[in-house]
């Protein structure tokens, strides 16, 4: 089989750099792309072989048939060796240079602890008001994208960005980051260019916040697909823009999300620093519900650190702030934190404590009580979060000795999780796998452990 760039391939990388070809790729005008390839001597048969299409399909496209399906466009790009970013399809290495800044090899080899320290320093600088844009911004600052932009933008343009972010975030909640991350980053590639366009000052401030929120979503979906360095880069840029937009609530939101990244990666100490830094911004925002979210996540981090007294203190404060928030108009990003999520977060903190052998008897039953209330209230648009709640509930049922119920709920979590594109689900199922595998004399529990093991390795 021919491969792009090999001596036997008629398509070489320089084919994609001519302006006429770049324009056709940017417009996803596959007919024009194929016609230009024909002009440089690439036959219909060769195009078909490289793209996995039939010659009749290639012929129809050459005659003007449009290609709209994302999977077909991606297959064509990959087969011909087109950088996906040239067609606005995905976050590949070429697009990364345009969207999120270049990351050299030395930085990629950095120890994870060093990266966490750098991000904490950057986050503290942004949160406390230091100037962050300029010659020292380094890898956090992306270069400008290439797609043409309007000469001036207004409120309508910003509303469209906000609407796109809401729609994409809804897909992330329901189906996982793997389902929509490419779309988020492709949208961001175009949206970032608007930061350079002329606009009235109020529009500019709203634009900063809108692009910050889209960067935050890009970070979250990157995290959900296991791309930690990409997540950190997007969150760093989101912090800068949120601060420029004067939105302390959004700053708190971004720090909360970065803290969750560290929690997920068993770095509870670093997560706690993110939540505490976020608490400063949350207090400045004046939103009690935002403060409640940060307190609840601090409780979870303290649970992972086996500090029961601090867990109870933060749970108590979470409840107080949540009660106080009922009379306020909360920012849109934090409205997800309803009474259902309150129980879920308290259950998560107690579940973290119950993993320590000395705490099982005391905290596992309390975690079960909270998680039952939580899982009963999840709706179909929160499937990923529902899986997380069910898996924690199942493992705590096993810790209190109700193995059969734990197995039953565990299988429910598995069934729901199999339809969601999220690496986090596989990771979050591991504690349940461990708990089930410990029941050596229970064949049903061992079967569940094996099912999770297979799911996590596929």
Image (cartoon, rainbow, N blue to C red):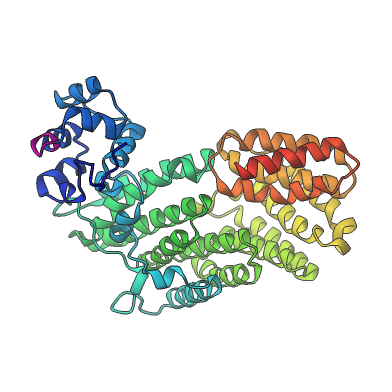
Residue 120 in the image, given as x and y percentages of width and height: 51, 74
| Residue 329 visible in the picture | no
Residue segment shown in magenta: 37-41
Q: Quadrant of the N terminus?
A: top left
Residue sitting nearer the eye, 31 or 365: 31
List x then y, in percent, for residue 13: 21, 50
Relative to 174, 347 lies left or right: right
Relative to 214, 445 lies left or right: right
Residue 374, horizontal then vertical, whole percent: 71, 44
Q: Residue at x 53, y 59 (%)?
A: 257
Q: Main secondary structure of the magenta part?
A: helix
Q: Residue at x 71, y 54 (%)?
A: 348
Residue lying at the far front in this picture: please name it: 7
Q: How many marks?
A: 0
Q: Residue at x 51, y 49 (%)?
A: 225
Q: Residue furthest top?
A: 56
Rendered location of residue 154, percent (x, y)? 22, 52
């Amino acid at each position: 089989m021919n491969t792009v760039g090999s001596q036997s391939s008629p398509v070489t990388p320089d084919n994609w750099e001519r302006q006429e070809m770049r324009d056709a790729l940017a417009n996803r005008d596959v007919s024009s792309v194929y016609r230009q390839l024909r002009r440089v001597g690439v036959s219909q048969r060769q195009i078909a072989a490289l793209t996995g299409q039939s010659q009749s399909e290639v012929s129809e496209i050459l005659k003007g048939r449009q290609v709209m399906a994302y999977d077909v466009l991606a297959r064509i790009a990959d087969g011909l060796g087109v950088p996906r970013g040239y067609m606005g399809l995905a976050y590949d290495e070429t697009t990364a240079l345009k969207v999120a800044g270049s990351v050299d090899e030395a930085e990629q080899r950095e120890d994870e602890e060093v990266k966490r320290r750098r991000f904490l320093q950057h986050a503290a600088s942004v949160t406390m008001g230091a100037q962050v844009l300029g010659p020292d911004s380094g890898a956090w600052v992306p270069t400008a994208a290439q797609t043409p932009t309007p000469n001036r933008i207004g409120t309508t343009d910003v509303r469209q960005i906000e609407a796109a972010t809401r729609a994409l975030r809804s897909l992330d909640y329901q189906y996982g980051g793997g389902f929509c991350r490419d779309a988020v980053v492709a949208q961001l590639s175009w949206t970032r260019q608007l930061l350079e366009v002329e606009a009235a000052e109020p529009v500019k401030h709203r634009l900063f916040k809108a692009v910050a929120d889209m960067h935050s979503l890009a970070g979250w979906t990157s995290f959900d697909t296991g791309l930690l360095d990409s997540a950190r880069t997007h969150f760093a840029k989101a912090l800068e823009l949120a601060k420029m937009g004067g939105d302390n609530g959004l700053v708190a939101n971004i720090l909360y999300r970065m803290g969750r990244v560290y929690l997920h990666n068993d770095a509870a100490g670093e997560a706690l620093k993110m939540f505490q830094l976020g608490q400063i911004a949350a207090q400045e925002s004046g939103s009690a519900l935002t403060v409640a979210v940060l307190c609840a996540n601090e409780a979870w981090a303290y649970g992972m650190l086996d500090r029961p007294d601090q867990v109870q203190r933060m749970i108590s404060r979470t409840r107080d702030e949540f009660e106080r928030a009922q009379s306020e108009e909360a920012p849109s990003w934090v409205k997800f934190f309803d009474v259902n999520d309150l129980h879920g977060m308290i259950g998560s903190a107690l579940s973290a404590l119950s993993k320590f052998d000395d705490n099982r008897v005391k905290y596992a039953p309390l975690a079960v009580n909270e998680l039952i209330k939580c899982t009963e209230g999840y709706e179909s648009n929160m499937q990923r979060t529902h899986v997380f709640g069910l898996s924690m509930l199942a493992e705590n049922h096993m810790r209190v000795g109700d193995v059969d119920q734990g197995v039953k709920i565990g299988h429910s979590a598995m069934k729901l999780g199999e339809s969601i594109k999220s690496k986090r689900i596989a990771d979050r199922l591991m504690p349940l796998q461990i708990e089930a595998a410990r029941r050596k004399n229970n064949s049903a529990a061992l079967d569940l452990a094996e099912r999770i093991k297979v799911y996590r390795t596929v």
